[in-house]
Image (cartoon, rainbow, N blue to C red):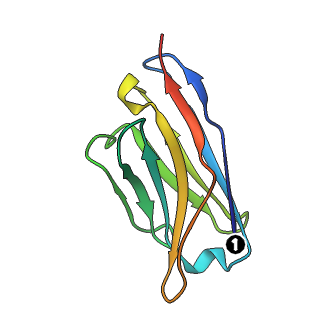
Amino acid sequence: VQLVESGGGLVQPGGSLRLSCAASGFTFSRYGMTWYRQAPGKERDLVATISSTGGSTAYADSVKGRFTISRDNFKNTVHLQMNSLKPEDTAVYYCNTYRPGIGASWGQGTQVTVSS
């Protein structure tokens, strides 16, 4: 299993970024996908999750209305569109999937820094 995140970077407050996670090594369309983030000195927190078909999504309260999770089951990718970014969104963002009986798989993370 391989999850490779991309799209992070430095952005000013109020700006936007689109993160992508390319998945391989498993049947992508069978499993939900989740974005987490971890700020320095803090625990890793769930940001957004999407069902296997993309028909159901859920978000942390802190990002509702600003972030959108989506997936493309033909391209085996999951995206996180982040708008109206705030300094408190600064973190390493990780892509995750959980397969029952196998466990969790994680990407290497991509850094998002929101600063003027």
Q: Residue furthest top?
A: 116
Residue 6 vs residue 68, the one in the foreground: 6
Residue 96 vs residue 66, the one in the foreground: 96
Q: Measured from the top left, where is residue 75 in percent x and y?
A: 73, 63
Name the image quarter holding residue 105: bottom right
Q: Measured from the top left, where is residue 49 in percent x and y?
A: 42, 60
Q: In this image, 109 relative to 87: left or right? A: right
Name the image quarter holding residue 28: bottom right
Q: In this image, 70 relative to 73: left or right? A: left
Q: Residue furthest front?
A: 41
**Residue shown at the point (55%, 56%) measured from the top left:** 95
Q: Is residue 43 visible?
A: yes
Against 39, is 2 above or below?
below
Against 9, is 25 above or below?
below
Which residue in the protein does label 1 denote? 1
Q: In this image, 73 relative to 34: left or right? A: right
Against 76, is 80 above or below?
above
Near mark 1 (Cα within 10 A), the count class, few <14, some 14-19 or many ≥20, is few
**Residue shown at the point (52%, 26%) measured from the top left:** 113
Question: Three-letter amino acid code at disc 1?
Answer: Val
Q: Measured from the top left, where is residue 1 in percent x and y?
A: 69, 72
Element at badge 1?
A: loop
Residue 19 vs residue 90, the one in the foreground: 90
Q: Residue furthest left?
A: 61
Q: Measured from the top left, where is residue 19 in percent x and y?
A: 59, 43
